Structure formats: structure tokens, C-alpha cells
Amino acid sequence: METSTTMADETVDRRIALEGVTNFRDLGGYETSDGRTVQWRRIFRSDTVASLTDNDVKTVCGLGVTVSCDLRYAEERQAEPSRFLGHAQVKALALGLDARPNASFLDSFDVMESTADAAYTYLLENYKHYPFLYHNAYRTIFDRLIAGDRVILHCTAGKDRAGTAAAMVLTALGVPRQTVFEDYLLTNAYWDAGARHRPGMSAEAAAAIFSAREDYLTAAFDAIENRYDTVDAYLADYVGLTDHAREALRNVCLS
């Protein structure tokens, strides 16, 4: 699994097969713009770790994971508690918002409209706000990585909030944006959303809700660059990732 291969080959290798979740994967192996490579077995992204089986927990621990970064809302964390709460090896960090910003701020599972257009609009608007709502979470993730922790980034699907967080981490490490998007879109190959579908939901709405779409992540990057011109400036000025911290992050996470 830990070989240097093409992106096409890595889509097979980087996914870690588990019993209770389908979108657990390693962010290692991606090349950066300066010729280095993201280390394998250091940063993972996943759908909800509340669904891990006992065997899955053993597998994840065997990967050396020490921190699970939970980006879900408080109500989601309460309804489906992390399997790592109180765990001896893996510390569960509740990094998601305690409450939704407002009643209309919905995540992919919460979109009730039956039309694809409404679902698409909800998700697009959410992505525009993620970088500014979750900046403290991103800084905590960076700090834990700098400290040497091996981390999981997860929300419920591992697509929206975790997908944006993973994009920020890879970007901070110097991974080219095209590769960042390729990683984001792997959710469409891996994640099984079948259990989350709701009666009466149209196929078009389900596609808008449960798919990773380039437009969604583009909205997040556009929102950052409209306000800060560059993602580097956003990371430094809004997230607080100083040049020194960013170099430390790269030294820990890159080979």
C-alpha cells in the first residue's frame, strides 16, 4: 500500500478497508510542489468513526492513530458518539461547532428538499462558509500534526466538513490544487451512502447531496481568495499558521 504510484493506482491502495465505514483513507503519498511527499500513515480522513466496529478500532489503532478530529455538530456527536471517547490510545477531539450557525445552515444529510437545485444551493453555500467557521479547528489540527500526532479528520460522510479540512491540510503542506481536488473527489469512488438515503428523495437530489462535487470545494477556495487573495494569506492571517509553524508542519508530515 505504501508505494509511490500514479494517482490512478493510488485510488485503489490508499483506501483502508473497514467493516463499519467506507470512506476511511490515507492522505499519504501525494507529491508537493517542492518535490517532497506527504508521509503515509500520518493523516487520515474518514466518514463517522461512530460506526467503527471493534475490529475496525483495532485496525485503526494498528495504524498508529493518536487523535481523532471530530468536525460534526454537537447534536451529531451526541446522537452518534465517537468510538474513541475515553479511548486509551486515540484521543477524541470535538472540533465541530457546538451549534449550527443558523437554522438554514445544513449539512448534506440534513437537506430535506426533494429538488436537486435546492440541495445543490444548500451545499454550495455551506462550502463558502466552512473556511471561516472551522478555522479554529484547522489550527488545532495543524498543532496536533506539528506535535507528532497521527490524526483522523472526520465528519459524518467524510465529504463536506472533513473534505474541506483535508483540502486545507494538503494545501498547507504544498500539495498542488489539482491533486487536492482529486483526493476530495475520491469520496465518490469510496463512500457508500445507501443507508443515509431517505424515502421520497429524488435521484437527482440524492446525487447533489451525497456526491463530492468540484463546484462545492471550488466555492470554498473562491471564498478564501475573494477575501484574502491567496490561501497562504488566509492560513497565515485567519487560521494563524505562521511561516515557522508551516515549516514545522511540513518537516513533520513530509518526506
Image (tube, helix red, strand yellow):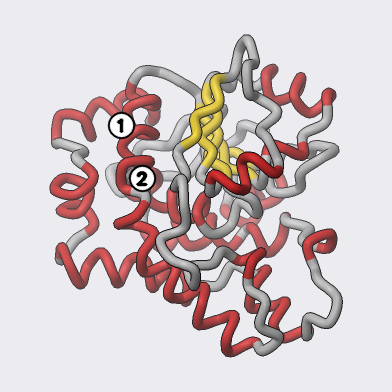
Residue 217's quadrant in the figure? Answer: bottom left
What residue is disc 1 on? Answer: 250
What residue is disc 2 on? Answer: 32
Q: What residue lies at 20% left-to-right and 52% top-to-bottom? A: 232
Q: What residue lies at 59% left-to-right and 47% top-to-bottom? A: 75
Give the crowd class for mark 1: few <14, some 14-19, many >=20 residues within 10 Å.
some
The picture places residue 171, in percent across and down from the top left corner, at 34, 50
Q: Mark on residue 8?
A: none
The residue tagged with tag 1: helix, strand or loop? helix
User: Can residue 209 be seen in the rendering of this structure?
Assistant: yes
Q: What residue lies at 64% left-to-right and 40% top-to-bottom? A: 78
Q: Which residue is nearer to you in this view: 143 or 175?
A: 143
* Mark sitting earlier along the chain (2/1): 2
The picture places residue 215, in percent across and down from the top left corner, at 47, 76
Q: What residue lies at 72% left-to-right and 77% top-to-bottom? A: 206
Q: Amino acid at mark 1?
A: Arg
